[in-house]
Image: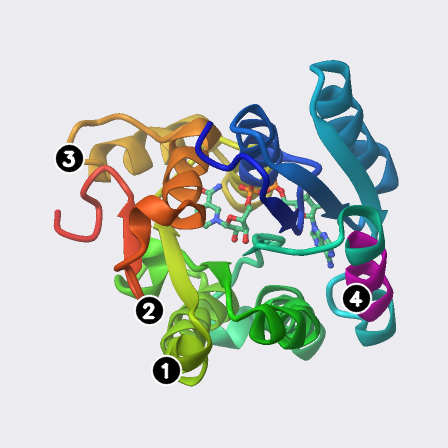
Amino acid sequence: MRLKGKVALITGGGSGIGKSTALLFAQEGAAVAVNDVSAESGEETAREIRQAGGEAVFLQADVTDDGKVAAMVERALKAFGAIDVLFNNAGISGVGAVHETSEELWDRVVAVNLKGVFLPSRHVLPHMMERRAGSIINMSSCIAEIGLMRRAAYAATKGAVLALTKSMQVDYAPYNIRVNALLPGTILTPFVEQYLQTSYDNPDEALAAIRKRQLTGELGRPEDVAKAALFLASDESRLMMGSPLYIDSGVVFG
Ligand code: NAD
C-alpha cells in the first residue's frame, strides 16, 4: 500500500479524474476527504470508498468560496487529524476564442480553475508547514504548453496553474512540501463529453480529430491520470519538485 497512513483531500472528487483518484488513493491505504460542489456525486464517491472498506468523508464546498473552503479544510482536519496530500483537481471547461468569451464565462473559468487552486492551498499550507511535510498536486493540462483552438480562458488558467505550481514549490520547499502539476491530454470523462456535445456540430468527427493528435491514436482514461497522481502523492516521487508531469499520449511533442 503506497499511501498507508496518509490523508488526502481531493477537490472535484465526484466525477472523472477526481473520482478515479479518490478510489485509487483509498485502495492504496489513504483516508480520503472527497470534496465536490455537487453533493450527490461527491457523496457517492465517499460511499463507494466506504463500501469497499476504505475511509472517506464527503465535504461539500465550492472551491471559489473562501469561507466554504476554510470550513472544508477544518472539517477534513477534524475528521482525520492531518492532511498529507492536497489534490487541487476541480475544474470546468469553457469554450471560445477571446472575442467569443463573455466576461462572465472568463471570470467563472478563472475562479474555478485558478482561484480554486489558490484557496484550498492557502488553507492547507499552514498545516503542512507546521508539520514540515506534504505533497500538493495541481491540475494543469497539456493546453498550458500547446495552442488549441477556442479554449482561451481555459488555456489561460491551466498555464497560470503551471506557473503557480513552480512559484509555490520555491516558497514551500524549505518546509519539505512538494508541489507538482499534472498535464493530461484528452481524457474521456463527463467533462470532455460535455465539451464535445456543446462545442461541435459533429461531436464524433471532433473526437476522431482529437484521436488523430495522439501519437498512439489512443485517448486517456481517468485511471491513467489517477496513477500519475498516486506517484506524485507518494514518497516515490520525493525528488519531483515543481515538475509538470505529462499524461497526454505524446500530444505535447506530436
Ligand atoms: P469532470 O467534469 O468529470 O469532474 C470535475 C469535477 O469538479 C466535477 O465533479 C464537478 O462537480 C467538480 N467541480 C466543478 N466546479 C467545482 C467547484 N467550483 N468546486 C468544487 N468542485 C467543482 O472533469 P475531469 O475531466 O475529471 O476534470 C478534472 C480536472 O482535470 C479539471 O481541472 C480539468 O480541467 C482537468 N483536465 C481534464 C482533462 C480531460 O481531458 N478530461 C484534460 C486536462 C485537464
Mark 1 near mark 2, Cβ–Cβ under 8 Å?
yes
Residue at position x 49%, y 70% in the image: 157
Magenta segment boundaries in residue numbering: 69-76
Q: Residues within 10 Å of mark 1 (few under 14, many from 20)?
A: some
Instruction: Name the residue carrying label 4.
Output: 69
Furthest residue toward top? 52
Please state which amino acid type lies under the numbered disc 2.
Answer: Gly
Residue at position x 37%, y 82% in the image: 170
Residue 184 visible in this rendered orientation of the protein? no
Please state which amino acid type lies under the numbered disc 1.
Answer: Val
In the rendered structure, which disc, 1 or 4, sits on the residue that comes first in sequence?
A: 4
Q: CA distance from mark 2 to mark 4?
A: 24 Å
What is the secondary structure assignment of the residue under circle 1? helix
Q: Nearer the viewer, mark 4 or mark 3?
A: 4
Instruction: Name the residue carrying label 1.
Output: 170
Does the segment drawn in magenta span residue 77? no
Residue at position x 65%, y 77% in the image: 126
Quarter of the image holding residue 122?
Answer: bottom right
- The circle drawn on residue 242 is 2
**Which sits in the foreground, 134 or 63?**
134
Q: Residues within 10 Å of mark 3 (few under 14, many from 20)?
A: some
| In this rendering, position of residue 244 left or right of residue 44 | left
Please state which amino acid type lies under the numbered disc 3.
Answer: Leu
Instruction: Name the residue carrying label 3.
Output: 215
Q: CA distance from mark 1 to mark 4?
A: 24 Å
Answer above or below: position of 134 versus 25.
below
